[in-house]
Image (tube, coloured by chain):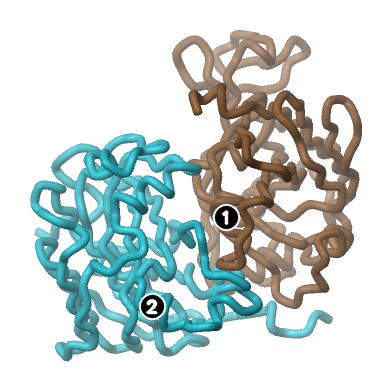
Amino acid sequence: MKRARVAYAGAIHAAAPHAQGLRLTDGRVVAEDAVVWLAPFEVGTIVALGLNYADHAKELSFGKQEEPLVFLKGPGSVIGHRGATRRPKDATFMHYECELAVVIGAGGRSIRRADAMNHVAGYTVANDYAIRDYLENWYRPNARVKNRDGGTVLGPWFVDAADVATPVALDLRTIVNGQVTQRGNTRDLVHDIPSLIEYLSGFMTLDTGDVILTGTPEGVVNVNVGDEVVTEIEGIGRLVNTIVGDAAFGR
Amino acid sequence: MQPNPFTFGFAPYRLSGTVYGVLLNHAPALAALGAAASEPPYKAPPKAPVLYLKPRNTLAAPTASTEVPADAPLLQIGANLGAVIGRTACRVAEGDALSFVAGYVIVDDLSVPHDSFYRPSVRHKARDGSCVIGTVVSRDQVRDADALAVRVFVDGVAVQIADTGQRIRPLAKLLADVTEFMTLAPGDILMLGTSAGAATARAGQRVAIEIDGLGRLEHALAVGSQAAHCHALEPRA
């Protein structure tokens, strides 16, 4: 099953897909562009992976990592489907990152690989934006690159784990203004989903709603004001975001 | 009745559960790195605030003992002044920043000691119960957040005497530079950063942190009940 969280006519609703857009739980059928899309689940801790596809690591000139490169993203960075993310006027390299987001269901500590997939509630699509101009080598990737308002796009749908075959091998791609700029498949994760759950739960208790952004393959490309950035994962969804400039925010 | 550190009697009435910290905001602490701060892997001292999150598994009231992990018998005490955000803070001006603060709180931001700050070190900063939060006091109880004495004790012995001064970014500047790119929400805590000379503590010890005007935070460290599994350090089969 797929479900969304949307704002419509003064309230927040859960919704299911419908031929004409979405069907709210109260029975109303509405068009995709008639609602405000929120992250499709109540987001807990956001754990993001860097350099978790072998080809992308090469693209950014890093060798194979032994320990997963993990960083955290804050709730203030989250926006939903059909949102707008700001590109500051001084940026020269702002790029998307299409990622499979894995949502924890049953939490736990010291979860072993063999049991890890029992702790997955479901999946959504993520776009983990970065502005490379602000990269510094202190707790890198640093907050000014990765923890910006609008920098964590999640949605459109939360897809139940039962609907996704394991091991998870889904095609993913990014499409900018109608052109495919990034392609990959989640089978190429350096540290796979069970490994990540085992690694993280080895030192921190995972809880329902925690989400792991599992990394992005090669093909991250600069995006400019006005660009429509679509991050798409087979069977999970097609997540749309538009890049806007400082002027929209009175800056 | 124990005061509940997660709610308080003035707007915004409760903590959001979002806690940010800043590394090396104490000028002497950055200076102590010496030339290393300009050499690889850092290549230059930090320009922007070096921020990190304490995720929700770390949040703890002082009444709950923090379990010391089996793989990290010594935890570094992180005595911090926390500013509790009172209203949505986006791109605040430095001159106006403190009007976005509802109150202040002592936070013990415990870490597994680490001496490389190149990567985010989530494994060292995000242990369960490693963000112990005291009782929030309202902003008007504190005259100058950048000039408060800080005293840290382990089992009653003073192990660090410091203050909230000598910050590369005093609180108002920190709020301005952080909210320039990331909005802080009501109930969020932004920590000012620890002073150089942080002490360590181990299971069985009691830690106390006093910050003038904010009272005293006391909490205990206990032996962990879970064995740690750091599988990343084992070879993949």
Q: Is residue A105 left or right of residue A54?
A: left
> What is the letter of the brown chain?
A
Q: Is residue B14 placed above or below B147 in the rendered structure?
A: above
A69 versus A211 height, above or below: below
The label nearer to you, 2 versus 1, is 2
Q: Residues within 10 Å of mark 2 (few under 14, many from 20)?
A: some
- Residue at (57%, 29%) from the top-left corner? A246
State the residue in front, A191 or A120: A191
User: Chain under label 1?
Assistant: A
User: How many numbered marks are there?
Assistant: 2
Q: Secondary structure at mark 2?
A: helix
Q: Which residue is mark 1?
A: A106
Instruction: Tell me the colour chain B is drawn in.
Output: cyan
Rendered location of residue A68, percent (x, y): 70, 69
Quick check: A126 left or right of A218? left
Q: Position of residue B122 (x, y in %)?
A: 55, 68
| Location of residue B199 in the rendering, given as x and y in whole percent from the top left corner | 32, 86
Respond whether the residues carrying marks 2 and 1 are from the same subunit.
Answer: no
Along the viewing direction, whichever of B127 and B210 lies nearer the viewer? B210
Q: Residue A156's x, y, as percent?
A: 68, 30
Q: Residue B29, labelled with which disc?
A: 2
Residue A178 in view in this figure: yes
Residues at circles 2 and 1 in contact by the CB criterion of under 8 Å:
no
Q: Residue at x 23, y 88 (%)?
A: B159
Amino acid residing under circle 1: Ala
Place residue B12 in its image quadrant.
top left
Q: Residue at x 54, y 77 (%)?
A: B37
Asked if one can make out residue B129 in the rendered structure from this viewpoint, the answer is no
